[in-house]
Image (cartoon, helix red, strand yellow):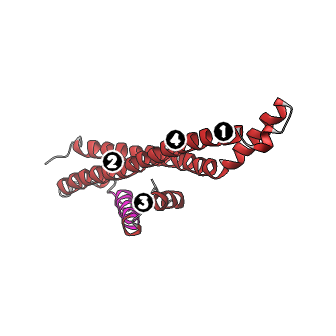
Amino acid sequence: MAIGTSSIFKEVLETYENDRNKSTQIIKNITDFEGLFNKKMPLEKITVANYNQTLNLSLDYIKNANTISSWVGQMRILIMRRKIAMKKKIDLATSREIKRLQSAEIIVSIASKTERDKQKKFFLEEALLEDQYELDNINIDLEAINTFVKEAENERDLSYAYYQAIKNMNLQM
């Protein structure tokens, strides 16, 4: 798991999190959590002496994995809300532009209906280019965050499996 060290995750987080200190802290926490999990004690090295401490650490891994999952899940919701808002903005701009184009002199002066429709489409695409570009970027960010959500869920599952493995150990106490 490497959400905290992913440059794509950092870029997405900085795009949607306005507070730079908060985004830096989230990345630091995720990196720390992932580092701790990667340094977990191998099952074969767990003894009666370190069993309770290792079991408690495994519960911390689950808590940390849940926190990471929550952060990326919230980020996904934020991106999805931004996508919906951008789609509504494009729909509104499209409607306004169509009304404007229907009365535009250059369009009215064209005799052929096919040519008028071509010109309308061209002017409409040109008017909405920036908004469409932003929507495309939001879609890419949403795809990326969906990948990180899956990674976070996998990390949570691994943490829980580690806890269960420790809990089910048959050590002679």
Amino acid on which the number 1 mark rests in the picture: Ile
Comparing 46 with 28, the one in front is 28
**Residue 154, located in which quarter of the rendered image?**
top left
Distance from the alpha carbon under mark 2 to that under mark 1: 54 Å
Disc 4 packing (10 Å; few <14; some 14–19; many ≥20): few
Q: Residue 8's spot in the image, x, y percent?
A: 53, 57
Distance from the alpha carbon under mark 2 to that under mark 4: 40 Å
Q: Secondary structure at mark 2?
A: helix
What numbered label is drawn on residue 17?
Answer: 3
Camera-near label (4 vs 1) is: 1
Amino acid on which the number 4 mark rests in the picture: Lys
**Residue 27, located in which quarter of the rendered image?**
bottom left
What numbered label is drawn on residue 98?
Answer: 1
Q: Which residue is mark 2?
A: 159
Amino acid on which the number 3 mark rests in the picture: Glu
Q: Which of pointers 3 and 4 lies earlier in the amino acid sequence?
A: 3
Q: Are marks 3 and 4 in contact (CB under 8 Å)?
A: no
Camera-near label (2 vs 4) is: 4
Q: Which residues are magenta?
A: 23-40
Q: Which of pointers 1 and 3 lies earlier in the amino acid sequence?
A: 3
Q: Which of pointers 4 and 1 lies earlier in the amino acid sequence?
A: 4
Q: Residue 95's spot in the image, x, y percent?
A: 60, 38
Q: Secondary structure at mark 1?
A: helix
Amino acid on which the number 2 mark rests in the picture: Ser
Comparing 140 with 57, the one in front is 140
Distance from the alpha carbon under mark 3 to that under mark 2: 27 Å
Q: Secondary structure at mark 4?
A: helix
What numbered label is drawn on residue 88?
Answer: 4
